[in-house]
Image (cartoon, helix red, strand yellow):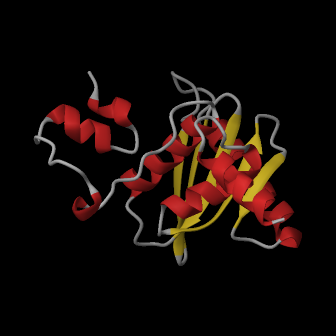
Amino acid sequence: MRFGTAARGYSDLMAGALTPERTARRLCELSADARAAVLLDAAGAPAGFHGVTGDRSGDFAQLARTMFETVDRAHRDMPGGPPEQVEIQVDGGTVYGSRTPQWMLAVVARRAALSSLMLMDLRAVLGELEGGPPIRRSTPASEQGAPVEATEEAAAGESPVPELGVE
């Protein structure tokens, strides 16, 4: 059984191996500010959750669906259509949402979370789920090999979303 557990852990690290069931957990692992997350498919059905018990996951998914539906109604007459990302301040925290044509991902975060970083994490995880490159985590300088010259290209390579550094 230990081999099965190790093989599953290894397969999660492989490019393109992020599954819908694992996506919410991946987001919470990336961000220290994330408390709970839920992934919904395009129809609004829950595909994965993390940070809530199984009996509360349905309530969490319904709240995420309601959030996106409310945003859609509020923006239905605006040019460009409804926004892809949402931020809602609530007592004791913040709720963030991001979506693609296939997925909707919502996360409850600490009040002190930086919006730009949390929204970037949401986009990066959704990109990874949709077959994009896996999110790279930086390594401490003591673990790196030869020092890399400080250039814009080198900095873009360390970004969780490297394409943001490319023009």
Looking at the image, residue 130 sits to the left or right of residue 87; the answer is right
Rendered location of residue 6, percent (x, y): 70, 59
- Above or below, 136 against 9 in this view is above
Q: Residue at x 21, y 37 (%)?
A: 154
Q: Residue at x 64, y 51 (%)?
A: 10
| Residue 86 versus residue 55 in the image, above or below | above
Residue 107, x across and y down, in percent: 60, 59
Query: x, y (%) of residue 129?
Result: 63, 38
- Residue reaching furthest right? 55
Give the total number of marks visible in the rendering. Answer: 0
Q: Name the one closer to the observer, 90 or 167.
A: 167
Vertical arrangement, residue 151 with respect to residue 35, above or below: above
Q: Using the image as rendered, state which of residue 63 and residue 38 is in the foreground.
A: 38
With 89 as the anchor, is 21 left or right in this view? Answer: right
Q: Quadrant location of the N terminus? A: bottom right
Q: Quadrant of residue 141?
A: bottom left
The relative height of residue 149 versus residue 89 in the rendered view (above or below) is above
Q: Nearer the viewer, residue 18 or 144?
A: 144
Quadrant containing the C terminus in the rendered view: top left
- Looking at the image, the residue that sits furthest to the bottom is 92
**Residue at left 33%, top 33%?**
164
Residue 3 lies left or right of residue 68; in this view the side is right
Give how far across and how far down residue 111 sits, in percent.
46, 72
At x 49% / y 72%, what residue is drawn? 110
Quarter of the image for residue 25 reads: bottom right
